Image (tube, grey):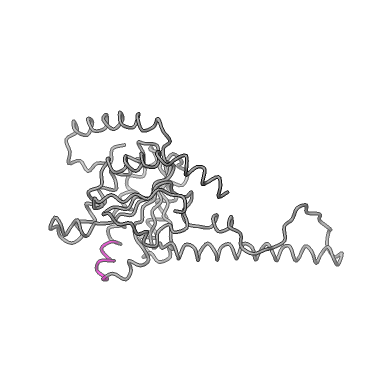
C-alpha cells in the first residue's frame, strides 16, 4: 500500500518497503494489536519550529498520518483511530477552525476521488463523534465516503471529529436510556395484557426485570468500538485530553517525544513491542473485567 507523497525516489520507496517486510516478519511472531489509537499532537509546534507558514504543520501532519496508516495496514492492525478534531477545538480562533475544516474537506474529497484504491485495499472509513456539529459540506463529504466504503472489512479507519469523551458518554447514556425505556414500555404493555386477559398470554422465560442502564448497554452505544490496545500521543504529552476516557481502562499508553509530523516507523514498532511485552497481563485483566 503506497501512500507516500511522491517526493522520495521509487528505488528508496521499494527498499524501504522490503525492509519493513523483514521487520514485520519478526514482529508478527508475537501478537499484533487489534486497534491502535492516535492523538496527533504537535502540528502547530512543528510549524513554529521549522518556520512554516500557517497551516504548514497540519499539511506535514497529514503526510505523516498517511505513512503511519500505511505501517498499521502492512502490520495487519485491524482498526486505527485518529483524534482529528475535538469539540473543544471550536474555542480556537475562528480562522484556525476554518482552516482545519477546509483541510478536512479537501482530504475527504481526495479520499472520494481515490475511492477505487481505498476499496481495492478493502478499507472501511468511518467518521465518529457528534457529526451534526460539522459544517454541511464536510458532513456531506464524510457521509459519501462512509457509504462508499461501508462494505469493506480488512481494515477500519475511525476518524474522531467533533469528538470528546464526555460527549460520547452522554450520548451512550441517552441512547441506552431510550432503549431501556422502550423495553420497559413493551414489558408493561405485555404485563397489562396478560393481567386483564385482553391480549394473548405470552410466556417469556428468564425475562429480567428492568433495573436501569447496564454496562453492556453503554458499551454498545459508545462511538468508538472495539476498545484500543494501544494509544499513541506524540510530543511527549501524557494527557488523554478528553479522548477515549471510557475505552482506555485496559490500554497501553505511549508518549514519544516526536512531534506528530516527525512520527515514523520506529515509533509504531516500539508501541507494538511494548504492547507485546504486556500482552499476557492485559489479556488476563480483560478476562477479569468480563
| Quarter that holds the N terminus | top left
Q: Residue at x 47, y 53 (%)?
A: 249
Main SS, magenta region, reads: helix
Residue 80, visible in the rendered structure = no
> In the image, is 224 to the left or to the right of 135?
right
> In the image, is 82 to the left or to the right of 265?
right
Measured from the top left, where is residue 236 in percent x and y? 27, 54
Count of picture labels: 0
Query: Magenta span covers which residues?
Result: 93-100
Most extreme residue toward the left, as rendered?
Answer: 51
Measured from the top left, where is residue 51 in percent x and y? 12, 58
Residue 263, visible in the rendered structure = yes
Q: Does 69 appear in magenta?
A: no
19 over 172 or under it: above or below: above
6 over 99 or under it: above or below: above
- Name the foreground residue: 23 vs 276: 276
- Name the foreground residue: 252 vs 148: 252
Amino acid at each position: 500500500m503506497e501512500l507516500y507523497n511522491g517526493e522520495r525516489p521509487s528505488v528508496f520507496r521499494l527498499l524501504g518497503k522490503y525492509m519493513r517486510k523483514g521487520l514485520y516478519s519478526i514482529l508478527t511472531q508475537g501478537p499484533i494489536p487489534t486497534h491502535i489509537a492516535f492523538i496527533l499532537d504537535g502540528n502547530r509546534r512543528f510549524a513554529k519550529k521549522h518556520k512554516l507558514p500557517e497551516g504548514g504543520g497540519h499539511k506535514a501532519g497529514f503526510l505523516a498520518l498517511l505513512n503511519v496508516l500505511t505501517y498499521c495496514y502492512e502490520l495487519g492492525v485491524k482498526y486505527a483511530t485518529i483524534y482529528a478534531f475535538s469539540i473543544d477545538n471550536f474555542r480556537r480562533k475562528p480562522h484556525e477552525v476554518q482552516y482545519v475544516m477546509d483541510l478536512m474537506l479537501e482530504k475527504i474529497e481526495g479520499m472520494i476521488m481515490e475511492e477505487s484504491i481505498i476499496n481495492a485495499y478493502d478499507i472501511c472509513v468511518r467518521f465518529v463523534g457528534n457529526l451534526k456539529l460539522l459544517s454541511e459540506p464536510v458532513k456531506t463529504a464524510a457521509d459519501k465516503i462512509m457509504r462508499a466504503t461501508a462494505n469493506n472489512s480488512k481494515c477500519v479507519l475511525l476518524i474522531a471529529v467533533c469528538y470528546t469523551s464526555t460527549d460520547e458518554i452522554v450520548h451512550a447514556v441517552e441512547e441506552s436510556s431510550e432503549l431501556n425505556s422502550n423495553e420497559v414500555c413493551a414489558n408493561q404493555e405485555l404485563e397489562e395484557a396478560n393481567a386483564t386477559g385482553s391480549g394473548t398470554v405470552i410466556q417469556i422465560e428468564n425475562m429480567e426485570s428492568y433495573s436501569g442502564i447496564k454496562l453492556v448497554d453503554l458499551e454498545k452505544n459508545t462511538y468508538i468500538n472495539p476498545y484500543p490496545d494501544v494509544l499513541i500521543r506524540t510530543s511527549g504529552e501524557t494527557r488523554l485530553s478528553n479522548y477515549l476516557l471510557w475505552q482506555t481502562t485496559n490500554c497501553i499508553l505511549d508518549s514519544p517525544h516526536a512531534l506528530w509530523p516527525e512520527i515514523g516507523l520506529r515509533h509504531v514498532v516500539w508501541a507494538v513491542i511494548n504492547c507485546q511485552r504486556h500482552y499476557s497481563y492485559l489479556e488476563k485483566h480483560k478476562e477479569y473485567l468480563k
